[in-house]
Image: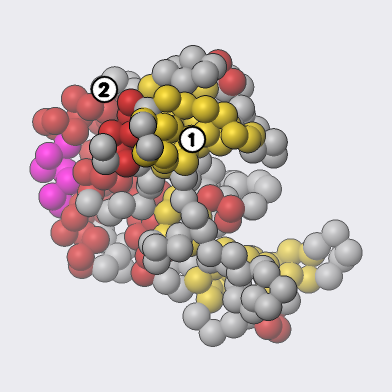
Amino acid sequence: MTDSEVLCAGELSVIGRVVEASNVTVVCEAKSGSEVVRCVYKPVRGERPLWDFPDGTLAGREVASYLISDALGWDVIPETILRDGPFGPGMVQRWVDTVDNHTDDGDRMDLVDLCPPAAIPEGFREILRAHDQLGDEVALVHADDPRLQRMAVLDVILNNADRKGGHALEGLDGQVYGVDHGICLHKDLKLRTVLWGWAGEPIPDGLMADIANFTQRLDGRVADELSAHITDWEITAIGKRAGELLEHPVMPQPRTSRPIPWPAF
């Protein structure tokens, strides 16, 4: 069986829990015979209701976000499905093994990180400055990395209201992945992200070509798949956001009073 088949049909066994998550988040292994795939499982029954996202479920929004990433051909979001599990139906997402930049001998920064303003390394973009708990000034920065830029463009299309620094993962396979997309796809503007470093700059032609292809297919199979998880109004809004990028292929500037999620990590 492929990893995808194991993820969809394998027996889920709980091996741990992410205790700092705001909703119930469980680490599992999906097993089928000798095949094992590690995954994250978020049961619907463990979700905290959000007054401004009254429709559907957070699990469904995570699946819809994956379907959009997949339809764009970007592989930003790990494979994500809706299936039954030990605590009922929920989102199941392939686990990402990540690079550890903070080992004893590690001297690299994370894709999104904090550092003294005078020590921003080459290849990073400053987003804002603040003071830490000791009163020292720090800069919020992110890598000037095309893999991360693609994620930032995806967040515009998803209308991601919660792109924290810890939601951008550098995989051991060399890919950059985004996780935690339960607060996405609202029909009204709610974009909150730490990835503002490219605001006002042109979006690369290759990404725009993918968006153009996506919009041509949105009204067909893609919309049919999305309709199981989000409303028709929200599907229409996806096309509108993608169409606005096609008309003006530039990363937007912040347009809300709270453009960065809090906490930022």
Quick check: is 29 in the magenta stretch? no
- The image position of residue 146, as x and y in percent, is 36, 69
Is residue 84 depicted above or below 10 in this figure?
Answer: above
Kindly identify the amino acid type of the residue bearing the numbered disc 2.
Ser
Q: From where the camera sits, is residue 187 visible? A: no
Instruction: Judge the density around disc 1: few (<14), some (14-19), many (≥20) Cα neighbours within 10 Å.
Output: many
- The image position of residue 113, as x and y in percent, is 62, 66
- The image position of residue 41, as x and y in percent, is 50, 30
Tell me how far mark 1 sits from mark 2, CA to CA: 29 Å
Identify which residue is drawn at 41% across, 39% down: 36
Q: Which residue is mark 1?
A: 29
Picture mark count: 2
Identify which residue is drawn at 53% across, 64% down: 99
Nearest the eye: 102 or 212: 102
Q: Residues in magenta?
A: 212-218
Q: Image check: 224 left or right of 76?
A: left
Q: Nearer the viewer, mark 1 or mark 2?
A: 1
Instruction: Name which quarter of the figure residue 253 lies in.
Output: bottom left
The kind of secondary structure the magenta stretch mainly shows is helix
Nearest the eye: 22 or 219: 22
- The image position of residue 191, as x and y in percent, is 47, 45
- For mark 1, give the secondary structure: strand
Farthest residue to the right: give it.
134
Kindly identify the amino acid type of the residue bearing the numbered disc 1.
Glu
Q: Are marks 1 and 2 in contact (CB under 8 Å)?
A: no
Instruction: Judge the density around disc 2: few (<14), some (14-19), many (≥20) Cα neighbours within 10 Å.
Output: some
Is residue 132 depicted above or below 57 in this figure?
Answer: below
Nearest the eye: 118 or 38: 38
- For mark 2, give the secondary structure: loop
Q: Which residue is mark 2?
A: 227
